[in-house]
Image: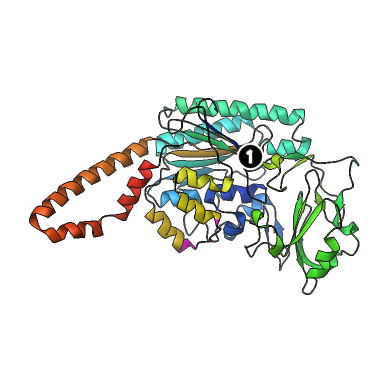
């Protein structure tokens, strides 16, 4: 794919480098502190209830809190979007869902290669038969295998080969469904994975063993979930908890929320708890005693190379054998929908949080999006957790270009007529010209990757 298209050296995922938060960054282009999906688990600090990953998919308020995924943005531009098994698919956003969607059943077997091929054929048929413009699809391997056996294990290598076969099957399916002249593929990842130190090789991080720290000083905690954690101390206990844990283990990092380095972009949202913990690569954070036995993990500092993601793109919209300097995963939706729109990218870099009403106006004003017959699917290969496949057609580019040419031709004729009949009408033409058409013409010019 790199030879036939575009590659990047790596992509840096957002912190926290776990599945649902990073997926929603891929969908929205926002840092986690701005889109608010701060963990794989929905939680309530008052009731202390925590829901696991699958159940969290159906907690609509966890996802629908002011940020719109690319499905909704595309649909508000007159396009059709779909999603299959992608985190966030089950929810509605400002009253809208992806026009075609399917959520995996509980206890779904993410390892089934036959199901992967069936799902690939399903989304290809959505493109061909239902004329969709954007589809996201999720594959849950080799994440599970990497967790259980480790990222460098023979079992994971075997699963990577299975994923590789499926990538090949997808590319062939594009041809089989007659989409090769229209459909483009982007492959990227949400995060990486690294080996965890086990079998007494190191002194593990167990919070209950740190002198001066007590769980009785907490109202709520999120630990025993890999190398990261968040704590909510009881009133008046913040400094006591912080001081006890700070320096409590040489490989444990402890920060008050407001003091976390800015590069993490993980402080501003109200769901982020007052104390943030993370461990050095190879370590996990245990609470009362070790209950985690995975041999592979993610969730570490996003600057660690083991957490980096890959990027590949191929299809008629992309150059061949070209290297793209795309470093930050949260900017991928900007490049997909508005390549070259540096103003929009800079706004997202600054972490501006928008309301649904603001995003509705924005998606309406940017009607020239280049999204067209796009397929995004997630799986994992090599040393990384998940792949993202984005397919989009150049067919809509041509439609938009032709529409723009016709619009410009009509406007020219009207201006000539106006000039002859009434000089004042010419001036009014520039005032009443459709802003959508102006933006559309700009976006057509921006479609060269």
Say if residue 94 shows up in the picture: yes
Q: Pinpoint residue 238: horizontal percent, then vertical percent.
A: 78, 69
Q: Which residues are magenta?
A: 350-357
Using the rendered view, name the quadrant where residue 91 is placed: bottom right
* The stretch drawn in magenta includes residue 354: yes
According to the image, what is the colour scheme of the structure?
Answer: rainbow
Instruction: State the residue in front, 138 or 245.
Output: 245
Looking at the picture, does residue 160 appear above or below residue 56? above
Q: Residues within 10 Å of mark 1 (few under 14, many from 20)?
A: many
User: Left or right: 92 with respect to 436?
Assistant: right
Which part of the image, by quadrant, shows the C terminus?
A: top left
* The stretch drawn in magenta includes residue 160: no
Instruction: State the residue in front, 440 or 322.
Output: 322
Secondary structure found at label 1: strand
Please identify the dominant SS of the magenta region. loop
Label total for image: 1
User: Left or right: 38 with respect to 136?
Assistant: right
Q: Residue at x 65, y 28 (%)?
A: 162
Q: Residue at x 79, y 74 (%)?
A: 236
Residue for badge 1: 309
Q: Residue at x 80, y 69 (%)?
A: 239
Q: Residue at x 24, y 57 (%)?
A: 430
Which part of the image, by quadrant, shows the N terminus?
A: top right
Looking at the picture, does residue 45 appear above or below residue 408? below
Say if residue 68 shows up in the picture: no
Using the rendered view, name the quadrant where residue 245 is placed: bottom right
Looking at the picture, does residue 99 appear above or below residue 214? above
Q: Pinpoint residue 147: horizontal percent, then vertical percent.
A: 75, 39
User: Left or right: 66 with respect to 261?
Assistant: left
Q: Pinpoint residue 437: horizontal percent, then vertical percent.
A: 30, 50
């Amino acid at each position: 794919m790199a030879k036939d298209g575009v590659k990047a050296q790596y992509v840096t995922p957002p912190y926290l480098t776990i599945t649902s938060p990073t997926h929603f960054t891929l969908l929205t282009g926002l840092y986690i502190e701005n889109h608010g999906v701060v963990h794989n688990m929905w939680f309530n600090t008052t009731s202390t209830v925590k829901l696991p990953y699958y159940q969290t998919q159906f907690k609509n308020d966890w996802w629908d809190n002011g940020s719109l995924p690319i499905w909704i943005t595309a649909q508000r531009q007159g396009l059709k979007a779909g999603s299959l098994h992608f985190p966030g698919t089950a929810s509605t956003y400002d009253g809208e869902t992806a026009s075609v969607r399917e959520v995996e059943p509980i206890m779904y077997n993410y390892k089934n290669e036959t199901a992967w091929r069936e799902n690939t054929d399903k989304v290809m048929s959505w493109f061909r038969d239902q004329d969709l413009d954007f589809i996201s699809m999720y594959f849950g391997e080799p994440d599970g295998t990497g967790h259980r056996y480790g990222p460098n294990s023979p079992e994971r290598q075997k699963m990577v080969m299975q994923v590789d076969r499926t990538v090949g099957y997808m590319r062939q399916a594009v041809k089989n469904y007659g989409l090769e002249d229209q459909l483009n593929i982007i492959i990227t990842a949400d995060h990486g994975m690294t080996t965890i130190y086990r079998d007494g090789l190191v002194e593990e991080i167990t919070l209950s063993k740190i002198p001066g720290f007590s769980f009785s000083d907490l109202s709520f905690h999120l630990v025993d979930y890999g190398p990261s954690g968040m704590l909510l101390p009881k009133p008046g206990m913040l400094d006591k908890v912080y001081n006890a844990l700070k320096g409590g283990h040489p490989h444990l990092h402890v920060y008050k929320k407001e003091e976390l380095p800015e590069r993490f972009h993980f402080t501003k949202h109200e769901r982020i708890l007052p104390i943030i913990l993370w461990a050095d690569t190879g370590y996990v954070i245990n609470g009362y005693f070790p209950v985690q036995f995975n041999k592979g993990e993610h969730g570490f500092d996003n600057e660690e190379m083991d957490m980096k993601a890959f990027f590949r793109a191929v299809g008629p919209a992309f150059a061949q054998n070209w290297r793209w300097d795309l470093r930050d995963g949260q900017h991928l939706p900007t490049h997909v929908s508005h390549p070259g729109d540096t103003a929009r990218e800079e706004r997202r870099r600054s972490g501006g949080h928008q309301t649904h009403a603001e995003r509705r106006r924005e998606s309406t004003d940017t009607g020239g999006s280049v999204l067209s017959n796009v397929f995004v699917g997630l799986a994992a290969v090599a040393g990384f957790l998940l792949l993202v496949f984005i397919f989009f057609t150049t067919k809509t580019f041509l439609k938009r270009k032709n529409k723009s040419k016709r619009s410009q031709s009509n406007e020219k004729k009207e201006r000539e007529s106006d000039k002859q009949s009434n000089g004042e009408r010419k001036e009014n033409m520039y005032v009443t010209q459709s802003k959508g058409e102006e933006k559309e013409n700009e976006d057509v010019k921006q479609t060269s990757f």
